[in-house]
Amino acid sequence: MYTSLTGNTRKLAEAMAETLEVEAWKVKEVSAVDSVDLLFLGSGVYGGRPARSMREFLRKLPSLEEVKIALFGTYGAQPRQLDTMASLVQEKGGEILGRFSCKGRDWFALGLIGRGHPSPAELEAAASFTQQIRDRAEKLSDQESE
């Protein structure tokens, strides 16, 4: 699940969803999260925070106890939104397995900053991160069921 105002984070979400063979969902299109063991959450950084729609979505979620979470996003200067997202997830009891971030093209600077990002190499790195998180989540699930 993701929010993307400029399309940068959407590109990451789609690369990750393809790796998992699932569909990437915009948080604005999701009203509830039921029966999920692993959740990928992504946002760009806007004024040092995740998009408002992501913050609102996370605040409205019920308990995330026993849910494994991976955070991802794009940024212009620093990926500070991931810290806010991590705090909101941890308040709900979610277990964060990892974070991934890369530069995004900054459309607020007329697209002149970060041109070419996320790059094909960064999208490949996002796919690799996704596979690592899935493997780690499966391993933890196997250990918990023993």
Image: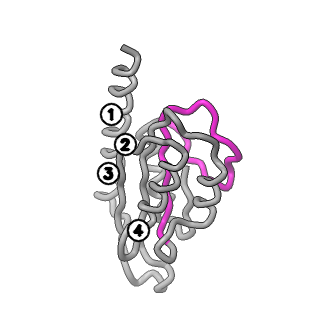
- Quadrant into which the C terminus falls: top left
> What colour-coding does the image apply?
one colour
Dominant SS type (magenta): loop
User: What residue is shown with label 2?
Assistant: 97
N-terminal of the two: label 4 or label 3? 4
- Residue extending farthest to the right is 31
Q: What stretch is highlighted in magenta?
A: 21-45
144 on left or right of 110: left
Q: What element carries label 3?
A: helix
Magenta highlight on residue 79: no
User: What residue is shown with label 4?
Assistant: 80
Residue type at mark 2? Leu
N-terminal of the two: label 1 or label 2? 2
Residue type at mark 3? Glu
Q: Is mark 1 on a helix, strand or loop?
A: helix
Q: Which residue is drawn at 50% across and 42% down?
A: 93
**Measured from the top left, where is residue 5 in percent x and y?**
57, 68
Asked if the residue at tag 2 contacts the one at tag 1, i.e. Cβ–Cβ closer than 8 Å, the answer is yes
Foreground mark, 1 or 3, reads 1
**Measured from the top left, where is residue 11 in percent x and y?**
46, 58
Density class for disc 3 (Cα within 10 Å; few <14, some 14-19, many ≥20) is some
Density class for disc 4 (Cα within 10 Å; few <14, some 14-19, many ≥20) is some
Foreground mark, 1 or 4, reads 4
Q: Residue at x 64, y 59 (%)?
A: 56
User: What residue is shown with label 1?
Assistant: 136
N-terminal of the two: label 1 or label 4? 4
Density class for disc 2 (Cα within 10 Å; few <14, some 14-19, many ≥20) is some
Residue type at mark 1? Arg
**Measured from the top left, where is residue 81 in percent x and y?**
45, 65
